[in-house]
Image: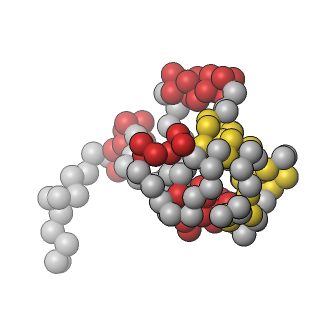
């Protein structure tokens, strides 16, 4: 085996949980080889460096060996080397320290502030006490 599809390899070395996710990320232009965005069907070779952008960080992986079947986590270091620069990890740490949660407005549970604003807007009405059958 001297060539493998990039989406298959990213899935096999456990960078993405499913091959579909790996292919979608490639289609969005977040996977680059040599500074050029690649399609999921692009074949890779040993020695190439693959850059994967998972905002806010861009990870870099050097291909040490090819694989098209998913493997256990203990075997991954034989197939790839993480060559991500330290400044990318600093960005990740700064994001963790800042405590900012990247969540779309209106999705998930309300924050404390949103809950307080909602209670103020409704005037403290207890919706559990209302009889909806009337």
Horizontal placement of 116 versus 59: left or right? left
Q: How far from the left and from the top, in percent, is residue 130? A: 18, 63
- Which corner quadrant holds the C terminus? bottom left
What residue is at 53 percent from the left and 51 percent from the top? 13
Observer-nearest of 86 and 79: 79
Viewer-side residue, 1 vs 37 = 1
Residue 39 x %, y %: 76, 65
Q: Is residue 59 left or right of residue 48?
A: left
Q: Position of residue 95 (x, y in %)?
A: 57, 28
Q: Residue at x 27, y 45 (%)?
A: 124
Is residue 47 visible in the rendered image? The answer is yes
**Residue placed at 71% from the left, 63% from the top?**
3
At a point 77% along the width and 51% down the height, the residue shown is 32
List x then y, in percent, for residue 38: 78, 60
Q: Specify whether residue 53 is in view.
A: no
Q: Quadrant of the N terminus?
A: bottom right
In the image, residue 99 sits, relative to residue 109, either above or below, namely above
């Amino acid at each position: 085996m001297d060539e493998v599809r990039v989406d298959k390899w990213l899935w096999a070395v456990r960078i993405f949980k499913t091959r579909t996710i790996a292919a979608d990320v490639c289609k969005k232009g977040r996977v680059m080889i040599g500074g050029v965005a690649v399609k999921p069907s692009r074949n890779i070779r040993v020695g190439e460096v693959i850059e994967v952008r998972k905002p806010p960080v861009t990870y870099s992986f050097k291909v040490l060996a090819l694989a098209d079947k998913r493997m256990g986590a203990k075997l991954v270091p034989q197939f790839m080397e993480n060559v991500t620069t330290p400044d990318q990890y600093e960005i990740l740490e700064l994001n963790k320290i800042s405590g900012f949660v990247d969540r779309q407005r209106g999705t998930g549970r309300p924050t404390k502030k949103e809950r307080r604003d909602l209670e103020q807007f409704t005037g403290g009405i207890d919706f559990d006490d209302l009889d909806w059958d009337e």
